[in-house]
Amino acid sequence: MISLLVGDDFHAINKKLAAFKRSLDHAWINFNYHRFKSSALDEAIDCALTPALGMRKAKLVVVEECNFKQFTEEMMQILQLLPQVPQQTHLVFLAPAIDKRLKVSKFLLSQGKLFEFDLIPPWRTDLIAQSIRTQGRTMGLSLEKNIVEYLAGAIGNDSARAESELKKLASYSNGTKLNLKEVRSLVPSTTQNSLQLAEAIRENNCKRAVKLLQGLLEKETFPLAICATLITQFRTWMWVKAALVGGVRQDAEIAKICEISNPKRVYFLKREVASIPLKSLTQAVSLLLDLEASLKCGRKGDSMLVEILAINRLFADDKVS
């Protein structure tokens, strides 16, 4: 059996891998569970072709960090051995994305099954709320609309934290209904603090920005979660400013163009970007996306300060444009 686990929701991907792993004979797991980098594809396929040991005869071979765009012709030749992989062996390819137009992608999809695990975009709070409501129900939680909305804002699109916090709420409630005050005390809103960080940067309040960032990191807030909130906020400001520069004036029209679910929020967003150049916002989003990429590549969160200060300087001498 061959599977492709694709996407950036690493928590969901690891849960799927754990489910695959449970099918193995525990007594023989060290002999039947193997992980390889995609650069060692030949070793991975050789391992997959070797029969499993133990009573169940099941084996799990995982090929990590697959960038299918960089698969060479030599790697394609190695993949031609896939039809020979024993039925009891589960060969899994992990990739952040897949371009189905690629030759290698078409071949792999013809041989196996695709599972896609993409994080909900952080600005789609409606979908995040829907996901939290659905997960809560599976855990026996009956959550009021205002609680779901609070959790969506407090947790964001961090699927690992969502599962952890909902389990905590389910354990605390013990079948009873929770109120918003109880939920607030149990689930802190780190997203709100990240939004405060975004405001401090936009206002060129360097001292406050540093203090907020240090506070978030001291609370062990996931650096990618901080970055995701900043990207969402600055991207929204950028879209609103671009709409205004482009001559759009009606709040309802701006809300539609910028995908803002609550048109009443546009009034405040327009005030927030009134004196900020579009160029500054565009550069801020670009720097934040670079920061996100470096964090995903393993960069430590305590090194974020340099980028935050660089972005802060973009708003030092803002003039209307």
Image: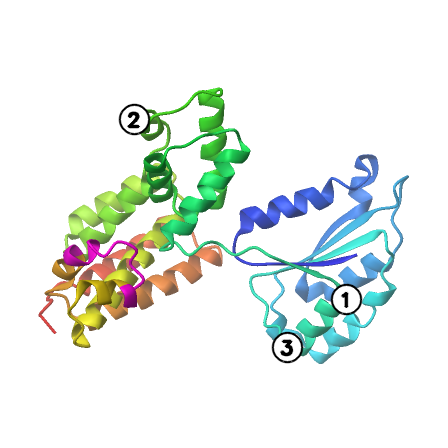
Sequence-wise, which precedes: disc 2 or disc 1?
1
Front in this rendered view, residue 102 or 309: 102
Q: Answer with left or right where residue 240 lies relative to residue 90.
A: left
Residue 164 percent across, percent down from the top left: 49, 35
Front in this rendered view, residue 3 or 259: 259
Q: Which residue is mark 3?
A: 102
**Where 299 falls versus 158 (above or below)?**
below
Sequence-wise, which precedes: disc 1 or disc 3?
3
Q: Answer with left or right where residue 9 lies relative to residue 210.
A: right
- Residue 116 forms part of the magenta stretch: no
Work out which quarter of the rendered image holds the C terminus and state it.
bottom left
- Residue drawn at x 26%, y 67% is 239
Q: Count residues near mark 1 (Cα–Cα under 10 Å), then give few for <14, some for 14-19, many for 20+.
A: some
Figure quadrant of residue 190: top left
- Specify the amino acid type for callout 3: Leu
- Residue 266 forms part of the magenta stretch: yes
